Amino acid sequence: MKRRAWLGFGANIGAPAAQIKEALKRLDACDDIAVVTQSHMIVTRAWGKTDQPDFTNMVAEIETGLTPTALLDTCLGIEKEMGRERRERWGPRLIDIDIIAYEKLIIRSDRLILPHPHAHGRDFVLRPLREIAPEMANWLVAQAEAGTG
């Protein structure tokens, strides 16, 4: 059964726009993932750790037969293949792929929290998400306000 998920992409070192396009291409090439639509890319100031270059961000909607955890593993694998090294929290990165939401599932596990716990407060997620899926952006904000997201 195919399900919908929304992924956030970000990069701020190397060639960010090209790296995001490459990550999308790699995701779309996976057997159980199809990119349905994507937002425009936006450039925003760094969040969390602000003494670094601006980020290029975008959101894509995908259709997948993967479970949320398998999708997470696929995203992490693509990041690693593309050279991502996790050295510091919120630090510079070649590519970042976050699962923003998977359908409207609420998951709390050691490996995965859905919806993404910070998505509702990040303009670089909400702005592109509103472009392609305004109802999902509204749901994220409502979940945060209700204390369930």
Image (tube, rainbow, N blue to C red):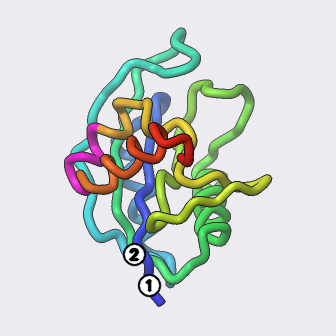
- For the question of whether residue 26 can be seen, the reply is no
The disc placed on residue 74 is: none
Image point 41% across, 28% down: which residue? 55
For residue 22, above or below residue 47: below
- Return the residue nearer the eye: 107 or 79: 107
Q: Which residue is mark 1?
A: 2
Neighbor class of circle 1 (other Cα within 10 Å; few <14, some 14-19, many 20+) is few
> Left of 101 or right of it: where is 70?
right
Image point 33% across, 39% down: which residue? 126
Q: Are marks 2 and 1 in contact (CB under 8 Å)?
A: yes
- Quadrant in which residue 78 is drawn: bottom right
Q: Amino acid at mark 2?
A: Glu
For residue 127, above or below residue 108: above
Residues rendered magenta in the picture: 127-133
Instruction: Point out the residue furthest to the front here.
Output: 146
Q: CA distance from mark 2 to mark 1?
A: 6 Å
Image point 53% across, 36% down: which residue? 118
For residue 13, above or below residue 69: above
- Between discs 2 and 1, the one toward the N terminus: 1
> Left of 130 or right of it: where is 106?
right
